[in-house]
Structures are given as C-alpha cells and as structure tokens.
Image: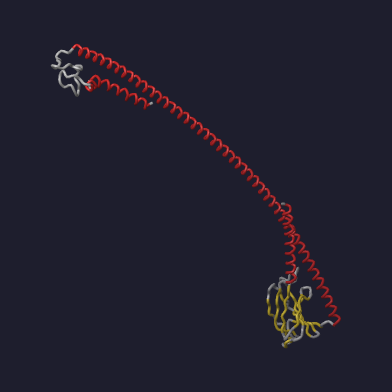
C-alpha cells in the first residue's frame, strides 16, 4: 500500500512538472523579453521624412530591430531575445533614405524597460552623421540573405540554449522531484511505522484494559459470591439461632407449664389434703356434737309437753330460741356444712382453671 501511494505521488509530481514546463515554455514563447523603446522625429536636413527605414545594429553590426518612418516620426522597440543579454550594450542607429545609408556616429545604450525620446536629423550637412552608398539590389538581397541566415543561426543558437537551459531545469526539477519523492517515501515509511507502532500500542492498551476488566469482573464476581455465601451463612446462623431460641422458648414454656402444673397439682393435693383434714375434723366435730346431743347438753331443757325432734344445734337463720328443734335448712346453714360447701366450690373452681390453662 505504501509503495502504491509512493508511485501515485511520483506520477502526479511528474505530470505536474510536465504541465508546469509546458506552461512556462508557452509563456516564454508567448511573452517577449525585456525591451527598450526609442521614439522621436525623423528629418533630412530639417525636412520630415515620410519614407525611410530606421535600423538598430548591435556591436557585431547585426540588425536587431528596424521600423519604417511614418509622417516624419518613428517608434521602435529593441527586445532582448531569450538567451542573450543587452544590458549595458551600445547600439548603432542607421537611416536608409534613398540610395544612401546614414549612420549615427554616437551609439545609444540599451536598458531594460527604458524609454528614450531621440530625434534623428540627418543629412549631408548634419553633424554626427556619416553616410555611404546603399548597396545595389543584388547586394541588398545577398546582405538580406546573409542577415536572414545569421538570424536563423542566431535563433537556432538561442533555441539550443533555451532547450539546454530547459533540459538543465527539467533535470534539476527531476532531481528535486526525486529528492522530494525519496523524502516523501521516507516520510510515508516513518508514518507507516508510527501508525504500526500506535496500532500495536493501542492493541496492547486494549489487551491490558480487557485483562484489567476481566480481573475486575472476576474479583467482583468472587466478592459477590463471598458476599452471598456470607449472607447465606448469616441467614443460616440466624435461622439456627431463631430455631434454638424457639426451641428454648418452647422448652421454657413447657418447663414452666410443667412446673406450673406440678405446683398446681401439689397445691391441689395440698388443698385436697387440707380439705380431707378439715372434713375429717368436721366429721369428728359433728360426731361429737351428735354424741353430745344424744346425751343431752347441760342447760338445754325441753319445752313442757313437747318432745324434741332434732338436735340442739343452733341455726344461722332459724332456731332462735334455746331448745327449739333445728329444721333441714338449719342443718345446711350450719357453719360446718357451709365450710364443706366452700371447700367443694374452691376445688371445682381450681380444677376448671387448670383445665382451661392446659
């Protein structure tokens, strides 16, 4: 992938270089080089010249620019061709008028971007000018042919120099492109290494994070398991303790019930013994009372003409008079009988209470 990207980058750089070279070549051919513009009047002995050719010659005598006079004036641009330098060079001005060629003795200096107004006033009597006979038609054609040949050779030389300069420039650009391509390949390799390193580091970090999360999950599950086991153990212990408490409470209640029943049984037995003793004592007392009644008690006298029908007992609600016989209700209301009835009621009440408690 990196090599394909590098190849694509090289191809794009070559295409860009070729397009730039073509644009620059077109610009060089479309645009003219630096120039110096000369203009002014053209006169022959003070008279305006309407027909004539103004030429500029370099140091070798080769014509570099020419223009025809029009309405007594001229305007010419001396352009520096590619591959040559006119800076500081002096040019000779000639005026071809009729069959004579007038040469200006004083040369003019060329300056890139310069604009010079220079009047050309020549003639036989004009100072600073010299003339010679213009060559014949054949000679002019030969001279023109030679000039054309020289111009062609000069153009070829200029073209060769431009091509050489373009080749050198393209070579430099190719070397520069190769260096840039090499630097780009190195940069892309470094970028690839950096990306691989970052990817490896990211994978390592993800693995470490995954391991850490797994350990944390395992620890959390173990803690939860331990917590559940501890809760289960606590619940089991609480249940056991509650069962033990209920068992102890049940045992305590049973023991208290047994003790209470035992105490109640002992109390009932004791009360029964006491009742038996009281009944026995009451029976003995009644027997003694009956014996006394059978023998007759001292101080008790029967009423005259009546025979006593009962014992000498004294009732609580009847037998108010001494010696009056006692009735059936008097026997019930006897203190001994009332005591026995109370004991019986107490025993019945206690038995019913114990029965309800059980």
Residue 265 falls in image quadrant: top left
> Quadrant of the rendered structure where residue 5 is?
bottom right
Observer able to see residue 172: no
Q: Position of residue 138 (x, y in %)?
A: 86, 81
Camera-nearest residue between 232 and 86:
232
Q: Nearer the viewer, residue 34 or 133?
A: 34
Q: Nearer the viewer, residue 270 or 23?
A: 270
Left or right: where 253 falls relative to 40: left
Residue 343 placement (x, y as % from top left): 28, 21
**Placement of 313 over or under 21, stated as above or below:** above
- Report x, y in % for residue 256: 38, 24
Q: What residue appears at the point 24 percent right and 19 percent down from the top-left corner?
A: 336
Name the residue at 64% across, 44% down. Answer: 203
Q: Which residue of the protein is positioned furthest toward the right in this rendering? A: 138
Residue at x-position 79% and y-position 73%? 60
- Residue 342 vertical position relative to residue 31 in the rendered view, above or below: above
Q: Quadrant of the C terminus?
A: top left
Above or below 357: residue 137: below
């Amino acid at each position: 992938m990196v090599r394909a990207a590098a190849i694509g980058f090289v191809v794009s750089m070559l295409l860009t270089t070729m397009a730039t070279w073509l644009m620059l070549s077109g610009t060089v051919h479309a645009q003219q080089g630096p120039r110096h513009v000369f203009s002014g009047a053209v006169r022959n002995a003070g008279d305006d010249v309407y027909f004539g050719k103004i030429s500029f010659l370099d140091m070798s005598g080769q014509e570099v620019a020419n223009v025809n006079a029009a309405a007594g004036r001229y305007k010419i641009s001396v352009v520096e061709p590619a591959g040559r330098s006119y800076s500081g060079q002096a040019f000779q001005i000639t005026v071809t008028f009729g069959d004579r060629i007038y040469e200006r003795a004083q040369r003019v200096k060329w300056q890139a971007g310069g604009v010079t107004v220079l009047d050309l006033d020549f003639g036989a009597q004009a100072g600073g000018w010299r003339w010679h006979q213009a060559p014949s038609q054949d000679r002019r054609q030969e001279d023109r042919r030679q000039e054309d040949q020289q111009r062609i050779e000069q153009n070829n030389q200029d073209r060769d120099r431009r091509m050489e300069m373009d080749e050198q420039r393209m070579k430099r650009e190719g070397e520069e492109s190769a260096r840039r391509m090499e630097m780009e390949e190195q940069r892309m390799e470094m970028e690839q290494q950096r990306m691989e390193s970052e990817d490896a580091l990211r994978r390592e970090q993800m693995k470490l994070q995954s391991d850490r999360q797994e350990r944390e999950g395992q620890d959390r599950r173990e803690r939860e398991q331990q917590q559940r086991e501890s809760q289960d153990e606590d619940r089991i212990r609480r249940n056991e303790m509650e069962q033990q408490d209920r068992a102890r409470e049940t045992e305590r209640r049973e023991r208290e019930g047994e003790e209470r029943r035992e105490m109640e049984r002992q109390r009932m037995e004791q009360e029964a013994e006491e009742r038996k003793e009281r009944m026995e004592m009451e029976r003995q007392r009644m027997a003694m009372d009956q014996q006394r009644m059978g023998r007759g008690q001292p101080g008790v006298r029967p009423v005259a003409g009546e025979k006593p029908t009962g014992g000498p007992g004294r009732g609580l609600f009847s037998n108010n008079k001494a010696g009056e016989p006692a009735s059936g209700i008097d026997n019930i209301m006897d203190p001994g009988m009332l005591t026995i009835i109370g004991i019986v009621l107490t025993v019945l009440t206690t038995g019913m209470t114990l029965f309800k408690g059980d």
